[in-house]
Amino acid sequence: MIIKKTIFISTLIITTLFSQDLRVDKIEPPNWWEGMKHNNIQLMVYGEGLDSVKIKSGELNITKIHELENNNYLFVDVDLSEAETGDYEITFTKGTADVTINYPIYERVLSSSIHQGFSNEDVIYLLMPDRFANGDETNDFVEGYVDTFQNQYTQARHGGDIAGVISKLDYLKDLGISTIWLTPIVENNTFRSYHGYSATDLYKVDPRLGTHDTYKTLVNKAHDKGIKIIMDHVANHIAIDHPWIKSLPTADWINGTVQNHLNANHHKMVFADPHSDSATIKHVQEGWFVDYMPDLNHKNKFLANYIIQNTLWWIESTGVDGIREDTYPYCDQLFMAKWAEVIMNEYPTFNIVGEVWTGNPAFLSTYQAGNKFREVDSNLPAITDFGLRDALADYLRGNKSLYNIYTTLASDFLYADVNQLVTFVDNHDVGRAMFYADSDVEKLKIAFHLLFTTRGIPQIFYGTEIGMKENEDHGTLRKNFPGGFPNDARNAFSPDGRTEYENDIFNYFKKMLMLRKEYPALSMGKLIHFPPYNDVYVYFKILDNEIILNVINAGDNDVEIDVREYSEIINGRVELINLYNLQKYNLNVNSTLIISNNKAVMFLIK
């Protein structure tokens, strides 16, 4: 039962120095929940004349009030350890003026279907809502929201939204997707806003994408279909058009100023480098990613609290299962370690993957929790595997052979947990896989065979499953999914609307994802591999009694493989089943397999 609390028991008074207008515009977070482990929260109050005020808090236990030099803001510490579910009134008084704000404490939704995390049993589908599907044309234009790039098609908003994602859940379920990662859905009321990484309100869904309720509906409907949701989160920066920039809560709320700030460098090895220079580290952590994305100062205690609470609020209010943390190395590393620790303590079944864009496993591995080569444990369970991605992209380009992929995987001893690496061939920031493959479908299939059968958590970029081929320009590679928008000439979400080429690739992806579910060794099994020879790569995935042999022939000629060379692993088994076409082989009759050129195959050994 919800009880309204109106009895003013505790009153904290700040001596009134002078009288002026008092206004309270909003409080963040806008609510909290009973029974949270994180039950000491800090309210950020926005308004005018917020200095020298009296606060009547009813039964809310206010422990401290922090006045700032900028009296448009006020921070209020509240202890909710004894608070019950209900509506609480907070009254701000200054002179003869007073403002009463209702502050709700909600009952938590406790269910095994929320905050599930993600693992190597899953396959992640990355999509950009604005470019995926338009499910609600009424929000294509919203009064007060503008984008000066709207006349440049590749940089403009195209009208895709959360409702569009909801409408395609069955498509994704049919493909075999178990987890969806949407690029940020928070308000981006700024130029070139379609991608979502330039927040102007960290507590609001961009109305051109939908509402908070729409997002919750997506999470609930996805969960009903056995699909998890990953929220894209940005702690590093905001948009130059964020209201904070016009009136900073504190002088050190951001790193530097709009007029004078450091520019970020990209030396992500600095945190593990024992010889690293402090000035270089400062440029990484405090430099602005770009001039129109102000860098947040995580050393500011109020901002640090704000970001942690904001993250917890989104997780609790929506039921999402994981977070993808954008531009992780550019954040203050001590703060991010605390941020991740708080989240994982509150949600032990949750998962967080940090975007760390470096292809060198020696440096990449140091960002993962449990690494022995960093003084500070990141507490970050998962990281993006740009090392394997770079190796796969080099293979697709023809720059390097399969041996480079082998040596990349041989570096796995550097990682605390290789099963918590999010693996991928392409994403929203790099050229599409088919672009690098130069339209070679068989080469693309080899790359994704590797992705789906090696260690880690595979991620697919929307449209790659139908062979989209675009260059490396961000606005171009993030093209619309055919059939997701009004007046599209065809619907590639349907087999009838896809070309023969698209159906070939789609059916291949669907088959691979089905096999991953049917044979757990492919997703969770131990990897045993052999150095590639003559463009032939042989590896096994083994889980309990399940043994699967993978053979990749990236050469121009057919090859023969004598399975007896792997007798120690096969351990007396005599039957092989080709999992692509179910053809059976008896090793007592013939132990030689013929593998066609430019093909990847796998065999269940029984």
Image (cartoon, grey):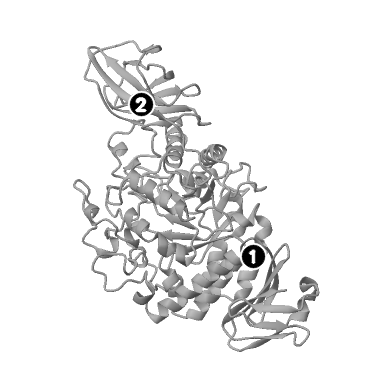
* Residue indicated by mark 2: 103
Q: Is residue 265 visible?
A: no
Q: Nearer the viewer, residue 129 or 136?
A: 136
* 523 lies left or right of 254: right
Q: Is residue 312 visible?
A: yes
SS at mark 2 in the image: strand
Question: What amino acid type should be assigned to the residue bearing mark 2?
Answer: Tyr
Which of marks 2 and 1 precedes in the sequence?
Answer: 2
Residue 22 picture quarter? top left
Residue at image position (76%, 76%) is 566
Q: Is residue 18 above or below residue 394?
A: above
Question: What amino acid type should be assigned to the residue bearing mark 1?
Answer: Leu
**Tag count:** 2
Residue at image position (23%, 55%) is 140
Q: Residue 473, image x and y in percent?
A: 36, 66
Extreme-left residue of the structure: 143
Q: Residue 419, image x and y in percent?
A: 62, 57
Q: Residue 160, image x and y in percent?
A: 30, 58
Q: Is residue 244 above or below residue 421?
A: above
* Residue indicated by mark 1: 409
Q: Nearer the viewer, residue 150 or 323?
A: 323
Residue at image position (32%, 33%) is 248
Comparing labels 1 and 2, the label whose residue is closer to the camera: 2
Q: Is residue 463 above or below residue 62?
A: below
Residue 262 picture quarter? top left
Q: Nearer the viewer, residue 303 or 98?
A: 98
Q: Nearer the viewer, residue 159 or 74?
A: 159
Q: Which mark is residue 524?
A: none
Quadrant location of the N terminus in the rendered image? top left
